[in-house]
Image: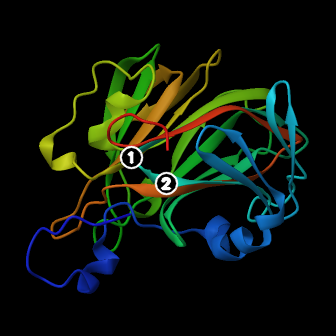
């Protein structure tokens, strides 16, 4: 991502204070995975180069791009490459069961991982824990949590960093789970298809990064600031720290995980004008 200069302090001095920067165990080897994946890349979706990573394999089918060989959530998966984008969406179905269902998402600019989100299932499949990582503030960023039902805001709160960065969602995390996954810069969210209603953003959120997950056909419950909320989508929005340089675009998303199969039915990356990258 290119950075917007907000003062005359040299940008290099603030590399640890860049909006939505983060890294976790599932994304440390992104550069190595990309290098190994060059021989297993396809262009299934408009403007996106899809590459297998780790032990994963890709197959184009009538249903979409089928990803198999997902056993190690730290290495096995799909790496999507595109030009400078401000919004990304992936519509996929994961076959989950037998102790599987762990995923790691990483947004990046070239080889630099700029934000991550992990999904870890309960042992009995009754729920999952979401763990977003934003470090726009030294020591870790706080973020807003919003829960939606049918596109309508049900409630919101704050979380992170540290233990408060993990959110437990109670739902049936077994069988064929449909996930619509979004990553975008907050001010450009409306260019995504079917944007959520009743979710205005403040001017200071410009450059903030957002992870959003929808589960069509499923509902879940989650406790937000002491209230039990029911929804079908959850959103995590970074709070930009003072002195941070907000990002203007990104160039790829990696999804690694453990699942019986992972089929991507559709994927798109858009620039600030709403055009496919």
Q: Is residue 132 left or right of residue 105?
A: left
Which residue is under mark 1?
A: 86
Against 220, residue 122 (above or below) is below
Q: Is residue 230 left or right of residue 226?
A: right
Q: Can residue 53 be seen in this view?
A: yes
Neighbour tally class for label 1: few under 14, some 14-19, many 20 plus, Cα within 10 Å: many
User: SS class of the residue under badge 1?
Assistant: loop
Q: Nearer the viewer, mark 2 or mark 1?
A: 2
Screen quadrant of the N terminus: bottom left
Q: Give the quadrant of residue 240.
A: bottom left
**Residue 217 x %, y %:** 65, 14
**Residue 158 x %, y %:** 31, 45
Q: Which residue is drawn at 35% across and 21% down?
A: 153
Using the image, tell me which numbered label, if any, was put on residue 14: none
Q: How does the figure colour the protein chain or chains? A: rainbow
Q: Which residue is drawn at 83% across and 59% down?
A: 40
**Residue 219 x %, y %:** 59, 19
């Amino acid at each position: 991502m290119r950075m917007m200069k907000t003062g005359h302090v040299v940008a290099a001095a603030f590399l640890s204070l860049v909006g939505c920067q983060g890294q976790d165990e599932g994304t440390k080897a992104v550069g190595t995975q990309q290098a190994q994946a060059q021989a297993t890349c396809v262009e299934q979706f408009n403007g996106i180069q899809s590459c297998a990573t780790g032990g994963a394999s890709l197959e184009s089918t009538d249903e979409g791009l089928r990803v198999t060989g997902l056993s190690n959530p730290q290495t096995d998966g799909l790496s999507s490459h595109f030009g400078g984008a401000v919004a990304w969406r992936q519509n996929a179905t994961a076959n989950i069961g037998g102790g599987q269902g762990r995923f790691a998402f990483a947004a990046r600019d070239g080889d630099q991982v700029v934000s991550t989100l992990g999904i870890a299932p309960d042992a009995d499949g009754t729920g999952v824990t979401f763990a977003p990582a934003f470090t726009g503030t030294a020591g870790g960023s706080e973020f807003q949590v919003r829960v939606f039902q049918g596109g309508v805001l049900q409630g919101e709160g704050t979380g992170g960093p540290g233990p408060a960065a993990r959110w437990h969602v109670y739902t049936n995390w077994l069988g064929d789970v449909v996930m619509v996954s979004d990553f975008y810069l907050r001010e450009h969210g409306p260019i995504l298809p079917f944007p959520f209603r009743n979710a205005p953003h403040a001017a200071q959120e410009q450059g903030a990064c957002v992870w959003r997950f929808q589960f069509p056909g499923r509902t879940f419950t989650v406790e937000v600031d002491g209230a039990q909320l029911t929804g079908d989508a959850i959103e995590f929005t970074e709070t930009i720290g003072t002195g941070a340089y907000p990002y203007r675009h990104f160039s790829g998303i990696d999804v690694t995980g453990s699942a019986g199969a992972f089929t991507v039915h559709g994927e798109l990356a858009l620039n600030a004008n709403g055009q496919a990258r």
